[in-house]
């Protein structure tokens, strides 16, 4: 079988070795090829023209063609599409595929669902209006939707429910440093947005020390933020946490590995409820596990239903400050074992349950059926 993996991402982003989206796409394609599904990547390049970008946001604009049909689409058995803008041009592309290649299976991946509440800028509101209008028509052309939520149907289309997977071979297991007995180092890696919610953890830290807390808690924040860092710094200044919160900026490769090696625990999103998401198979959580780190999450994941995995803590999906005493208790229970043993157990679990070759099997099975 032959197929295409369609995206709408600039080539320079796809070429970045450490870019999260790029890594995920490449691991998907590698997994499909390993399973005998010869898959090529094709990217529709987003326009750099400002006028066209603005016009594309307009809800019912029929004049901006973003996804042009090309002949290779006529001869493939399947097409896997990572979510693009749901506009007239996209619907026309799908319609043409089904008209010219009716036996072709079309799978659409929606990385986060629901997603309407993820917008934080007024300029994006017209785009959501357009999305809501056009997605009602997707059922005419799309055979399955890949989701990392627990929804059995989205937009009237049956889903393939996946756990987010990682290529564990490409993720180095962390090497623990000598721990100071009274210290706990946590890491939070993200392209930080309001729904990551790490302000809840900072508020919890502040209140913990206001009450006379004695343990040394350090939070290592890695990545860039789209305005949320101002809020973080307000809380840091309010509680004088400057020596306990380290902003590392964007880090990759060996530099990022060195930060991971300092840390004994990782924070997944603490504020997904702010965007209306209450279940999420977090990609970052799987990367943390592949590193060998215990995970604290503020959104329900597949690990909530695993009874024999003791290296995962769920905190409430609301606006309450994180209870640092609970974090400390979790930490102390875990590290009764030697740290190397803890790392090894978490890493093995990630390899057995969250490797991409395992997580992507529902897609492979559907395409081969």
Image: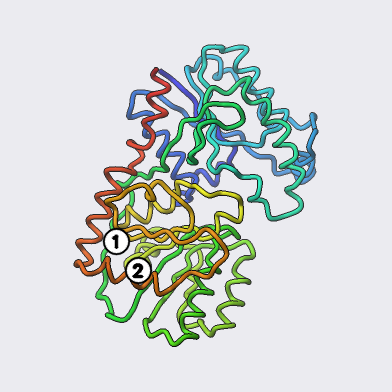
Mark number, residue 4: none
- Residue 285: x and y in percent read 41, 53
Quarter of the figure that contains the N terminus? top left
- Residue 315: x and y in percent read 45, 61
- Residue 20: x and y in percent read 47, 49
Give the residue displayed 37% in from the left and 28% down from the top. Answer: 33
* Residue 17 is at least partly visible in this image: no
Q: Nearer the viewer, residue 24 or 355?
A: 355
* Between discs 1 and 2, the one toward the N terminus: 1
Q: How is the image coloured?
A: rainbow
* Residue 64 is at least partly visible in this image: yes
Is 46 above or below relative to 119? Answer: above
The image quadrant of residue 91 is: top right
Q: Secondary structure at mark 1?
A: loop
The image quadrant of residue 87 is: top right
Give the residue displayed 39% in from the left and 19% down from the top. Answer: 368
Q: Which residue is mark 2?
A: 263
Q: Which residue is mark 1?
A: 174
Quarter of the figure that contains the C terminus? top left
Q: Secondary structure at mark 2?
A: loop
- Residue 155: x and y in percent read 61, 30
Asked if marks 1 and 2 touch (Cβ < 8 Å), the reply is: yes
Q: Count residues near mark 2 (Cα–Cα under 10 Å), then give few for <14, some for 14-19, many for 20+.
A: many
């Amino acid at each position: 079988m032959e197929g295409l993996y369609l995206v709408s991402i600039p080539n320079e982003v796809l070429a970045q070795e450490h870019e999260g989206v790029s890594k995920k796409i490449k691991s998907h394609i590698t997994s499909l090829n390993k399973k005998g599904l010869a898959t090529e990547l094709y990217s529709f390049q987003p326009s750099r023209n400002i006028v066209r970008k603005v016009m594309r946001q307009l809800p019912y604009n029929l004049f901006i063609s973003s996804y042009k049909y090309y002949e290779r689409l006529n001869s493939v058995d399947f097409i896997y599409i990572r979510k693009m803008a749901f506009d007239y041009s996209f619907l026309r592309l799908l319609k043409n595929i089904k008209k010219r290649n009716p036996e072709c299976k079309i799978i659409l991946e929606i990385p986060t669902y629901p997603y309407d509440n993820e917008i934080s800028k007024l300029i994006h509101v017209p785009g959501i209006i357009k999305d809501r209008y056009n997605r009602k028509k997707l059922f005419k052309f799309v055979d399955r939707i890949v989701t990392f939520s627990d929804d059995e149907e989205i937009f009237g289309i049956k889903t393939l429910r996946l756990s987010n997977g990682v290529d564990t071979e490409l993720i180095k297991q962390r090497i623990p440093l000598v721990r100071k007995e009274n210290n706990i180092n946590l890491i939070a890696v993200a392209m930080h947005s309001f729904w990551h919610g790490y302000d809840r953890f900072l508020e919890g830290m502040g209140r913990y020390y206001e009450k006379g807390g004695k343990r040394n808690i350090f939070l290592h924040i890695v990545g860039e933020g789209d305005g949320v860092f101002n809020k973080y710094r307000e809380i840091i200044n309010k509680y004088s946490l400057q020596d306990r919160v380290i902003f590392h900026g964007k880090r990759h490769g060996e530099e990022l590995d060195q930060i991971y090696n300092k840390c004994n625990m990782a924070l997944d999103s603490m504020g997904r409820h702010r965007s209306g998401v209450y279940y999420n198979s977090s990609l970052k959580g799987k990367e943390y596990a592949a590193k060998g780190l215990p995970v604290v999450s503020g959104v329900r994941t597949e690990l909530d239903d695993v009874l024999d995995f003791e290296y995962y803590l769920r905190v409430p999906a609301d606006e309450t400050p994180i209870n640092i005493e609970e974090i400390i208790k979790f930490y102390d229970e875990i590290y009764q074992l030697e740290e190397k043993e803890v790392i090894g157990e978490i890493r093995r679990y990630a390899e057995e349950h969250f490797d991409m070759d395992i997580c992507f099997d529902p897609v492979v099975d559907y395409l081969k059926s």
